[in-house]
Image: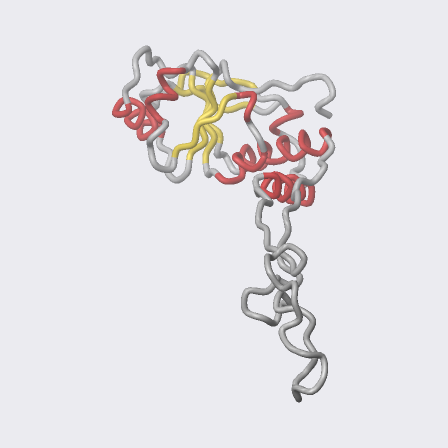
Amino acid sequence: MASVSLTSISGKKSGTVELSDELFSIQPNVPVMHQVVTAQLAHRRAGTQSTKTRAEVSGGGKKPFSQKGTGGARQGSTRAPHYTGGGIALGPRPRKYTQRTPRKMVRLALRSALSDRNLAGRIVVLDSWEMETPSTKSAITALRAIGIEGKVLVVLTPQDDAVAKSLRNVVDVQIVSVAELNAYDVLCNDWLVFTQASLPMAKEGDK
């Protein structure tokens, strides 16, 4: 079973903690991660863009000029796409961009992302944050003491409300709960910071 050092907020090592092999020690499946992340980003699209066709724009009930005798091309309506104020041909219409992704694929993508960060040595497990009141300065000091740089994903439990309030406005720090942990957020950040309480464990059916 894989393990990482257990760290205090002062940066000192206080032991080791075991990681679930099913979550942190599998061979990352890159195609599955790509498909799940693509589906997650597609789900964020509103799909509310819309244009009016020639049937929906107002006006155009009368022919602009006679069918014959003008010397010009015959026209049936001023609402045709080539007229100013006419309808839009082949324009965007409201649609859904969501993609169906099986649960097993979503779980595999998350396990692959966690394993990738573990293989890169980018996972930190704290014994606890030791914060009872919000303090952004103390939270930033703790991250610096741990010795991590770049974008950081901090995984918290519902009881870590003070930590969430301390880090919510810090640049390059993203906060998620254990239940919200997903492959996209893991891959978007350089480091993962857990506590012993927020460290995910394998469940039945994760394989």
Can residue 95 be spotted in the picture? Answer: yes
Which residue shows up at 47% across the image and 38% down it? 189
Residue nearest the observer in this picture, 87 or 92: 87
Residue 46 appears at what percent x and percent y?
Answer: 57, 42
Residue nearest the observer in this picture, 13 or 162: 162
Task: Locate the N terminus and report the quarter of the image it occupies.
Answer: top right
Which residue shows up at 43% across the image and 32% down it? 174
Residue 47 appears at what percent x and percent y?
Answer: 60, 45
Q: Report the side of 100 relative to 176 (left or right).
A: right
Tell me where residue 129 sits by quadrant.
Answer: top left
Residue 80 appears at what percent x and percent y?
Answer: 64, 67
Task: Locate the C terminus and report the quarter of the image it occupies.
Answer: top right
Residue nearest the observer in this picture, 106 or 51: 51
Residue 41 appears at what percent x and percent y?
Answer: 58, 42
Can residue 5 be spotted in the picture? Answer: no
Looking at the image, is 104 positioned above or below residue 72? above
Looking at the image, is 102 positioned above or below residue 69? above
Which residue shows up at 61% across the image and 69% down it? 78
Looking at the image, is 77 positioned above or below residue 137? below
Looking at the image, is 36 positioned above or below residue 24? below
